[in-house]
Image (tube, coloured by chain):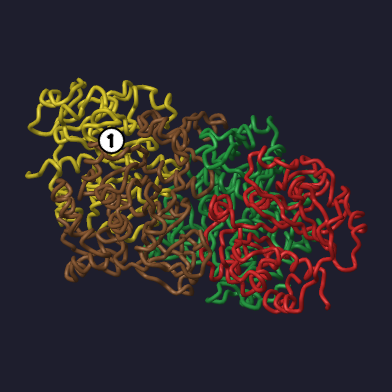
Chain colours: A green, B brown, C red, D yellow
Amino acid sequence: MNLKQDKVTDLATAVKTYIKDGCHISIGGFTINRNPMAAVYEIIRQRVKNIHLYAHSNGQGVDELIGGGSISNLEIAYGGSGKFAATCIRFRKAVQENLVTVEDYTNYQMTLRFLAGSMGIPFLPTRSSLGTDIINKWGFSHKMRGDSPKLPDSKLVEMDNPFKGWCDVEKVVLVPAINPDVTIIHVQQADRRGNCRIQGLTFADVEQAKSAEHVIVTCEELCDNEVLKRDSHQNQIPFIHIDAVVHLPYGAYPTACYKYYDYDPRYLKDYAEKAKDDISYGKYLDSMIYGCPDHAELIKKIGQEQMSRISADPETGYAKNLDRR
Amino acid sequence: MNLKQDKVTDLATAVKTYIKDGCHISIGGFTINRNPMAAVYEIIRQRVKNIHLYAHSNGQGVDELIGGGSISNLEIAYGGSGKFAATCIRFRKAVQENLVTVEDYTNYQMTLRFLAGSMGIPFLPTRSSLGTDIINKWGFSHKMRGDSPKLPDSKLVEMDNPFKGWCDVEKVVLVPAINPDVTIIHVQQADRRGNCRIQGLTFADVEQAKSAEHVIVTCEELCDNEVLKRDSHQNQIPFIHIDAVVHLPYGAYPTACYKYYDYDPRYLKDYAEKAKDDISYGKYLDSMIYGCPDHAELIKKIGQEQMSRISADPETGYAKNLDRR
Amino acid sequence: MDYTLKEMMTIMAAREIRNSDIVFCGTGISMLAAMAAKNINAPESVIFFETGAIDSRLEEIPLAVGDSRVMYQTSANGGLLDAFATMQNKVTGKHVIGILGAAQVDKFGNLNSTVIGDYNSPSIRFSGSGGGCDVASFVPRSIIFMQHEKRKFVNRLDYLTSPGYLDGPGGRKRAGLPDGGPVMLITNLAVMRFDDITKEMYLSAFYPGVSPVDILEKMEFKVDISRATEATPPTEEELWLLREKCDHQRLIL
Amino acid sequence: MDYTLKEMMTIMAAREIRNSDIVFCGTGISMLAAMAAKNINAPESVIFFETGAIDSRLEEIPLAVGDSRVMYQTSANGGLLDAFATMQNKVTGKHVIGILGAAQVDKFGNLNSTVIGDYNSPSIRFSGSGGGCDVASFVPRSIIFMQHEKRKFVNRLDYLTSPGYLDGPGGRKRAGLPDGGPVMLITNLAVMRFDDITKEMYLSAFYPGVSPVDILEKMEFKVDISRATEATPPTEEELWLLREKCDHQRLIL
């Protein structure tokens, strides 16, 4: 956190400052929506390695970070991108080829883990996963846990309800808090101090941000401080949690940003196709990521015609009648 | 809960239907803001008795329910109404005269208890109150707890962190969930199905509503369903949690309703004065509560002049330069 | 009447949904089933996504539960915390019906959507639980969609991702879970249900043209076929509403 | 210069607040101290209420932390959960300074704001913890406001509502609390602080015209007065800003 009045910076600087080899991060968004894709691409471009990534169902962003070779450890609930990839393709390959060490949780558990981190407590209880292999099977060994001060000593802990039978509950699962070194989110509006306003679903972005040591926000619109101080019940994250603000139109592209643009079905289908094969994927990386000095260049490459096709209808917040087959 | 399309009813019916002698309830709002006062007065008017009340810092509403003789048990964090009564006067008298059985928690603990109830789990952890009498001193005896299936067997439970030292925490306090029979809240806008939109601070209203078996909502504006379905990220409580919707302008009076009206300093000062003495308080009850068949009558009695003095400035949401000395 | 298997499966699920249900949907056919129910037989049912959207006005089919289309004209747009709390909540959770898919199922309706092979070095990796284990843990009723193949109906799951009846009668209670479990499993051949007493899967209905014995051959474990009847195919009206009101863009069908 | 005791007390607290502080305020003088700091010596400090309002633009003085005036032009309007999580949060909590009041204090800065007498049958009932115990539990620094009277500075609290240093050095750690505790206690006579090693209260500064010995007489327990100096009264500028920028309606002063 930081209480500065002006935290605006450029994306390359923000990533260089906060995203280090081996750091623990989380990214916002859900499957094909509001992933901080510009930041994901910049991390790949800067060739940051050995990241420990916390994800619930972050979909496209997770798959690209894995495909770009930045991830070594992954705590995850779901590696899928909706209809475009029921199981994310580079994720699946990396797990099957033992290129990443993965540990499974549920979506609620990952969200509760961020919430616990944001609340400053070591765990939260739930009834989810009792009796399942989510509890029994660990991805990270006792040794790996013992070697890292950034990992709790157990995956999950089952406990009898100490208020006997209260709420008709006999047992709960305790999920350990996550406190990422850095969380990156993409929002519709932010001001220079870092106040954030998300439109539509917030997913787990708020908890992910508040649980982190540092937060980078990319935003579609950079607003005057005065603007977001009006109707401030619409702001979900106050500036005290934020370290860097980057003004980045289309920062979630090729995923969607409600009220601004839809996901790009053409890009995502093309991605899924290229992701199947290492050689074609290498070409994808070269042309779309390494080949673009920044996100603006990628958007330029996609072209105005396609960008206007996915531009959001102001009433519905998505691109009506977009060809999504 | 109930999925009906139209839950609109009148206040007397809603209170008669859901608020029974001996039931466990919670009310929304905080100190002198957005207390569901019309409902509080109706409960007193219907002479409901032996209510078990859960409160954080609900202030004026709590004091009037106690003063009206409706409360026998009280779980509370704070009995005060800001500058008007640093300690609520009828609350203080009732506790000192052993007319109510009271058990103390902190504001965070009460809020977490509603949150736990809303999440369907038996408890939540916090570090608050370790080492204090909040843990050591119980208001409700073991016997009283044993006799009621609606009370957990312990007040609070201390526990060692099962994820040893994780988050630099060695110990936590577990707070038991609350699931009131009924929660009553007053909101700025609701629709006929019960979707609710609160402006300004939500306090703990959302958690209180979601933890209850039944919820009564009183609202300043009754909106068409279509209205609240727009920009629905501004709705905090979806209709599935709500049982009854009552259209009740000035339903929070004499407490404030952000963007609609301010608290009435004259009423609150007068109340604090009358509350000091049983005889003058009896007269207050007779004239302002029993003497008014409904809330509209009370508002009429206050008079248009005073109501327009406390009318909110549209920009700030309160009555600017109101005489509050 | 002319209908596809996908249409048959969708309608089988839709008919199970009641007017007072809050329907937890995933992507694809499960979302379509919820939309079909709302447009055909359960207009008051409420469509609900783990991403936090409730009562979405689905004018176009979302291609993921995070699709912006689920955010349009909801009753509230929250987040994952709100959604899962609604399912775990004692009051609202009782009204939720979950619709799930998986890679493997066992006779007690437990599901694997995580890995084939050893967990730490799998031969096939799937997407993982997502909200699947959560909903299967919390809610009283769920519907499962699967393809009917021997390698999917197995004696022993490689990984138990989402709880059905666990090890049978009383299994959920012993594990600490609330009552619940799958009420039906819909495949490309049949509708399976679970016995009230034994909690074991049995054949409830086979699609026209499919023989119960053929179905048994596509499963590692045996199930009771004595109670099976032929399923009633979609009616003309059901099909019309499904095609025109739910997926006129033919994104799922 | 002409100033009131309340003004003296307010300025004593304001001077303790730093530019990087997030200031948790209650009602009355504590809120005024936070406003004074922001207008005088710590313009970048952030005013923060347990009700969920952060960085409020206080154009008028709120008469309660639930007053609509705290909601105007905030950085975010949340609820109690947000506010207390901010204090318990490992990152933001470290920057919060709490301002508290109480009915009794002991030499280790523990506070009673609940009852006098037996808890189950008290002779005097106060408001209770509110958020006081929470902030005292969570945050690294707090300021206490009290009236200097013998019955309030006691050897043994009737009820320990909010933790100071508990039973002295290491007390908070033994109880499981994070580091923290009061850094100063401001009364109508003096400023007390707490020894780094013993965690015991000592007299840090006495107001002009007040003798350290008089102060001792108004306490049940003895404190070290050897380190005491005379407090520097409010400057003309401080007073002007306090009166004109913070409480021009004279609601607290």
Q: Does any portion of residue D34 appear in the rendered image?
A: no
Helix, strand or loop under label 1? loop
Question: Quarter-wise, where is residue A140 in the image?
Answer: top right
Q: Position of residue A310 (x, y in %)?
A: 63, 74
Question: Quarter-wise, where is residue C35 in the image?
Answer: bottom right
Q: Is residue D233 left or right of residue C64?
A: left
Q: Is residue B273 left or right of residue C128?
A: left
Q: Is residue B83 left or right of residue C191?
A: left
Residue nearer the viewer, C179 or A146 = C179
Point 36% across, 60% down: residue? B186
Q: Which residue is mark 1?
A: D114
**What amino acid does circle 1 point to?**
Thr
Point 81% across, 58% down: residue? C204
Q: Quadrant of the C terminus of chain C?
A: bottom right
- Mark 1 crowdedness (10 Å alpha carbons): few <14, some 14-19, many ≥20: many
Q: Is residue D243 above or below residue D103?
A: below
Residue nearer the viewer, A299 or A115 = A115
Count of number-bearing discs: 1
Q: Position of residue C222 (x, y in %)?
A: 88, 49
Q: Is residue D119 left or right of residue A213?
A: left
Residue nearer the viewer, A6 or B323 = B323
Q: Does any portion of residue A24 appear in the rendered image?
A: yes
To which chain does the residue with label 1 belong? D
Q: Position of residue B185 (x, y in %)?
A: 38, 58
Q: Quadrant of the N terminus of chain C?
A: bottom right
